[in-house]
Image: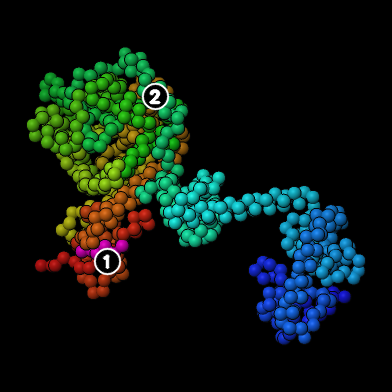
Amino acid sequence: MTRPGIREISPGTVVEFFESKEILCGVVLAVKDGRLHVLTERNREINLTRSRAIHHGETLLNLKLTRDELAKKLAEISARRKQLQQDIDLEEIWSLFEGEGGEFDPIEIAEFLFNKPVPDDQSAAIRRLLLEDRLYFQEKDARYSPRSSDSVEQRRTEIQKEADRETRLSESAQWLEAVWGRKSVQPPPFRNEVVSDLKDYSVFGQEAKEATFVKEALKRAGIVPQPLSAFRLLVRIGVWNENENLLLHEHGICRTFLPEVIERAEQISHSTVLETAASGREDLTELPTFTVDSEFTRDYDDALSIRELEGGIFEVGVHIADVAEFIPKGDLLDRVAEQRVSSIYLPDERISMFPPSLSEGALSLKAGVDRMALSFLIKMDRDANLLESRIVPSIVRIQRQLTYETVDSLIPGDASISILFELAMKRRQRRLEQGAIILPLAEIHVYVNNAGMIQISRYEKETPGQIMVSEWMIEANAAAADYLSEKGVPAVFRGQAECRPETECVPSEHELFRVYRQRRLFSRAELSSEPKVHCSLAIPRYTTVTSPIRRYSDLLVQRQLKQAIAGTADLYSREELDQFILRIGAAQARIFTIQRKWTKFWILKYIEQEDIEMMHALVLDKNPRFAHLLIPDFLLEVNAPVPENSEFKQGELVRINIEKVAPRDDVLKIQIIESPHRS
């Protein structure tokens, strides 16, 4: 319904309307079917719906004037109203209405200020002010209510924040556009905040806190608003490099240690712990002790020894770095290690659980220096029958630091290592007879040097040196579990409930196929504060204590073990350990994901770098549409569509063509092109 005193819109009526967020004047040339044919102040004819007309009054223009004359008069009207708008103090108007309450339309407000009848220019100026106002009045259904004083102040703060954000957006977009175009430009004063927002968006995408801001800034900079674009910008800025590990950022893994942690590690490294604790330890420094690790190892936490006693008896020593003696429960370093859970080994870096001054220094079983250890001394005869075992705090001095390859070469000629290997094989055979299941699966070792060169090698776990070390670590871990169980001491035990046999026999000439199929049937190993059977090892009670420098759970077990040996109260209650096991499960899964995905990233980089186009793959599973394949060269699993009329089966090798490799996107797209010729 039309307000009394306001004429209907007819040809010649001057109307106001929004166009591109700007208020313009126009004159109605014709009205047809509820639509207005209008000539604008910019001398352009347009059609409007009635609802788009935000103001009209008594002002009429003579349509007999020329088009240019009409446009000129409209421009004059618009200029007068803009000037009036500038002359009116909206804050003063608000102060008159602020305590009145109620809602008002623009004409009512204009009538309060001016003599009636209110001229069109004044009423239009008031309406323009109210439409553009974001501070003093609140609009609802074309009526305006004054805000309270508190609300005005709150709104003023909000508007300032919006203005600041707009400034930040504009300057950020200008900077990012220049960076994208590789132009040298001065960054804005809030550069660090923009970089932080880009990082979050690179890692978390839409879930990033400032995702909306970053996307808008990228759009304004003419850059596709995607996480990969933010990543590329950070590379061009020099914050990250092309091979930045975003997984570490995603999971909150810190590469470095805080200064106070480094300082505490230095204090321990230079302490006199060894001298003060030596009197209560068994001196084993004369034993021919040696470590066996990979050529890249720098943190040595276990060593072996063997000596022959009277009557053809041998004493095998498994010596574990006594980390618990240096780092007590609740220490700053203990809290850091608990948070990190374990060391992380990646192709291009290692993130240790303890600072290097400890993990590679004071804690490490380095050759030629006395080190505190927890020694497992296992006596057995030549047939590997277990006669007696002791667990003692000790001092050891490593004589040799060997690699697995060196041990392989020494086994035939080195008497001590030869006997250690022989006894280990006999203990292994005994476990197999008791139901142990050994499914050897090689590891693919990916190493990236400082120059970014990628080296990939196959790491066989069934070499003589690997078997020897593995078996003696199993013996020590089982001995620790037995001792703790017999004393009724809770710990972090490791169990495996079931090893189901393969029931669907699929023939294949490839051993790798059998290993993968059988492994799928194994239950996952689980942690518990109570001892449980470990199925695949065929051991009734099992824990891990042999890597306290690298795994926090091993350090916990070592502490409990030392307390039990000393006959003192447990350091950890069962409830504490149960809570820890809940936390460590998620943390270990996170670390495993990082290691697996980042290794795959570098394998894909290698395939891309070497321009590999064709390989062989083993068919693990197949349905009419897709095949699940394993690429033996890299132990990578991948899916591929099954070609029409294909005849290959599970367990067979097929040839594949590499169609697309995108390491950053974790994409390896392949095509099955043929299977080997059947004889």
**Height in image: 618 above or below 156?**
below
Mark 2 burial class by Cα count in 10 Å: few <14, some 14-19, many 20+: some
The reply to whether the magenta stretch includes residue 657 is yes
Identified at 25% across, 37% down, the residue is 296
Q: Residue 377: name its quadrant.
A: top left
The amino acid at mark 2 is Glu
**Height in image: 385 above or below 216?**
above
The image position of residue 661, as x and y in percent, is 31, 59
Which region shows up in magenta?
Answer: 655-660
Marks 2 and 1: CB-CB under 8 Å? no
- Mark positioned earlier in the residue sequence (2 or 1): 2
Image quadrant where one finds the C terminus: bottom left
218 vs 604, nearest the viewer: 218
SS assignment for the magenta stretch, majority: strand
Judge from the rendering whether residue 138 lies leftward or rightward of residue 420; answer left or right: right
Separation of residues labelled 2 and 1 (CA atoms) = 55 Å
The image position of residue 390, as x and y in percent, is 26, 24
Element marked by disc 1: strand
On the image, numbered disc 1 is attached to which residue? 671
The image position of residue 167, as x and y in percent, is 60, 52
